[in-house]
Image (cartoon, rainbow, N blue to C red):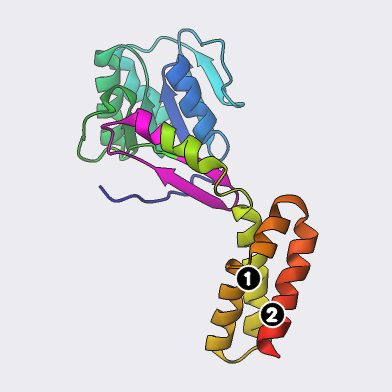
Amino acid sequence: MIPLLHDFDGERVLIVGGGAVGARKARTFAREAETVVVSPAFADDDFAGANLIRAAPDPDDLAAWVDRVDPALVVAATDDETVNEAAETAAREHGALVNRADHSGERDPGSVVVPATIRDDPVVVALATGGTAPALSRYLRERLDDEIAGAGEMATVLGTVREELKADEPDPETRRRAITRILESPDVWKALRTEPAKARGEARRIVEEVTG
């Protein structure tokens, strides 16, 4: 299994099932994709603004639902294996990706695993165990959450510095040295967590020191 990142901006995701699992999947995808959840009932939970459609599609209806929504990904998240199987079949026939929430411990060719993620935009860290131990993925996510605090701001700072160096510094080795010094600076990391403006100033000081 090889992890990949997929850009869902402008895509649709169809989730079949409105229980706690469907809500969790909706929270994952609604931040980026137009997300549609079809279910006869919905958990008293946060669906992150997904479009909730109250309907009880039987297996014979799912191909029509998939054709109507035209999703890039179908998530089968009901507690009815027959419905989930039909959702998977409809997704494959439509050419969409499929995630079977009830097959977390199994590997189905052509299916995708939704990993536990840690976000500090634009940094995303994904954790997966191949579906064999989801609890371990959640545990590692909790352990690592604090460890990457400030990583998103660091990525933004480094992106800006890289562009400035490419414009002003012709020597690639000098550019790499400056980036490495910023990345390894305890002062920059400390400031990123409390005073981002100060961190950016410290990064520029390092660049000036390295480039002369």
Residue lying at 37% horizontally and 51% vertically, measured from the top left: 4
Q: Nearer the viewer, residue 127 or 13?
A: 127
Residue 40, compared with residue 69, is above or below; it is above
Badge 1 element: helix
Badge 2 element: helix
Residue lying at 57% horizontally and 26% vertically, measured from the top left: 50
Tell me if residue 160 can be seen. Answer: yes
Tell me if residue 70 can be seen. Answer: no
The magenta span reads 117-138
Residue 55, compared with residue 153, is above or below; it is above
Q: Disc 2 marks which residue?
A: 207
Q: Amino acid at mark 1?
A: Ile
Residue 118 lies in the magenta-colored region:
yes
Q: Disc 2 versus disc 1: distance between alpha carbons?
A: 8 Å
Where in the figure is residue 201, as x and y percent of width and height?
A: 78, 69
Q: Earlier in the sequence, mark 2 or mark 1?
A: 1
**Rendered-image quadrant of the C terminus:** bottom right
Q: Disc 1 marks which residue?
A: 182
Residue 205, compared with residue 38, is above or below; it is below
Instruction: Name, please, the residue furthest toward the front.
Output: 186
Numbered-mark total = 2
Q: Nearer the viewer, residue 175 or 50?
A: 175
